[in-house]
């Protein structure tokens, strides 16, 4: 397990085959730099590795809405752990059916429980572990977490000129595309005079996140394939958020969404999302091209 982020001297850990995302979510904490999603290379119902070192202090069951276009659990869970790196801070973990007990010491990588398909997900959302660092006095709310710093570095890469690639995996809910020119970590784009990696749900979540190795400033323009995605409105150290410009994406005649993550190690794949499951006709190993309009 490697440390990929930290907050308040609390390390957040995952293995190198994970993808991570600060911004590919509609929920408030992800637009405030206070939440990180870890995507282990595992399916729903498989074991969820702990992202922190701590002692379980509370498990809370939360009723959640019914999933749209998919069968979901009627409940989600919040697992609260006292950090052993900073005992004055709690860690909140979501989307795991817990098997750990109150008072149990958990090390990074140790099983917390089972990955849950929550009703808070969208139909294309893969299994993941949501992490926040909190005060003991305010452990549960959507607001109120501490900002998280990304530690893992971004590889140097040239921006892509177009969105072309090969379908590696095809499902009714989404297709995974190996994009020509993408870096090993994700989809590179221009940020001012520099290059960063995108982390976003485009255009459906309304914001685009970008990761660089340098401190970002408000006002920097962000471009993809030469077209403006937006201007940085919120910046936190080496990450920025821009409100999406009026852009859309099409595969042939079909409107699609792009789901983008930061890959830690191995090939970065771009997720193409249909408007409804089963409405895109893509074959495995088919060459595809996505237009920005």
Image (cartoon, rainbow, N blue to C red):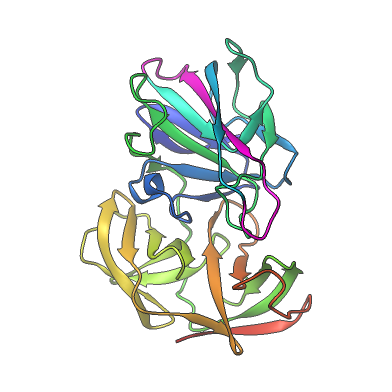
Residue 175: x %, y % from top left: 68, 69
Across the whole image, how many numbered discs are drawn on residues?
0
Q: Which residues are magenta?
A: 67-88
- Give the quadrant of the C terminus: bottom left
Q: Residue at x 54, y 35 (%)?
A: 94
Q: Nearer the viewer, residue 7 or 25?
A: 25
Q: Give the vertical position of 46 relative to 276 (above or below).
A: above
Q: Nearer the viewer, residue 85 or 247?
A: 247
User: Picture quarter containing residue 90?
Assistant: top left
The answer to whether one can see residue 255 in this image is yes
9 sits left or right of 117 in the view: left
User: Picture quarter containing residue 218?
Assistant: bottom left
The answer to whether one can see residue 216 in this image is no
Q: Residue at x 40, y 19 (%)?
A: 86
Residue 157: x %, y % from top left: 47, 68
Q: Nearer the viewer, residue 85 or 118?
A: 118
User: Hey, which residue is sitting farthest top in the picture?
Assistant: 103
Taking the magenta stretch, the answer to whether it contains residue 101 is no
């Amino acid at each position: 397990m490697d440390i990929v982020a930290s907050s308040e001297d609390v390390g957040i850990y995952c293995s190198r085959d994970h993808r991570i995302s600060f911004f590919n979510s509609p929920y408030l904490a992800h637009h405030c730099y206070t939440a990180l999603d870890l995507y282990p290379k595992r399916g729903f119902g498989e074991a969820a590795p702990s992202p922190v070192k701590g002692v379980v202090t509370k498990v809370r069951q939360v009723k959640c809405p019914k999933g749209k276009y998919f069968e979901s659990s009627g409940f989600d869970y919040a697992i609260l752990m006292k950090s052993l790196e900073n005992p004055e801070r709690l860690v909140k973990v979501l989307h795991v059916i817990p098997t750990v007990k109150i008072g149990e010491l958990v090390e990074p990588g140790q099983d917390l429980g089972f990955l849950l398909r929550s009703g808070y997900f969208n139909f294309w959302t893969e299994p993941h572990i949501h992490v926040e660092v909190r005060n003991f006095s305010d452990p549960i709310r959507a607001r109120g977490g501490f900002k998280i710093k990304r530690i893992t570095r971004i590889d140097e890469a040239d921006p892509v000129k177009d969105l072309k690639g090969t379908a590696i995996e095809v499902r009714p809910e989404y297709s995974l595309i190996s994009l020509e020119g993408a870096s090993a970590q994700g989809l590179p784009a221009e940020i001012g005079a520099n290059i960063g990696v995108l982390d976003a749900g485009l255009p459906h979540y309304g914001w685009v996140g970008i990761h660089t190795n340098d401190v970002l400033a408000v006002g920097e323009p962000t471009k993809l394939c030469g077209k403006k995605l937006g201007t940085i409105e919120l910046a936190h150290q080496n990450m920025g958020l821009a409100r999406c410009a009026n852009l859309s994406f099409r595969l042939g005649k079909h409107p699609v969404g792009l789901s983008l993550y930061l890959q830690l190690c191995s090939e970065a794949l771009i997720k193409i999302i249909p408007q409804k499951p089963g409405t895109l006709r893509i074959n495995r190993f088919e060459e595809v091209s996505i237009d920005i309009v």
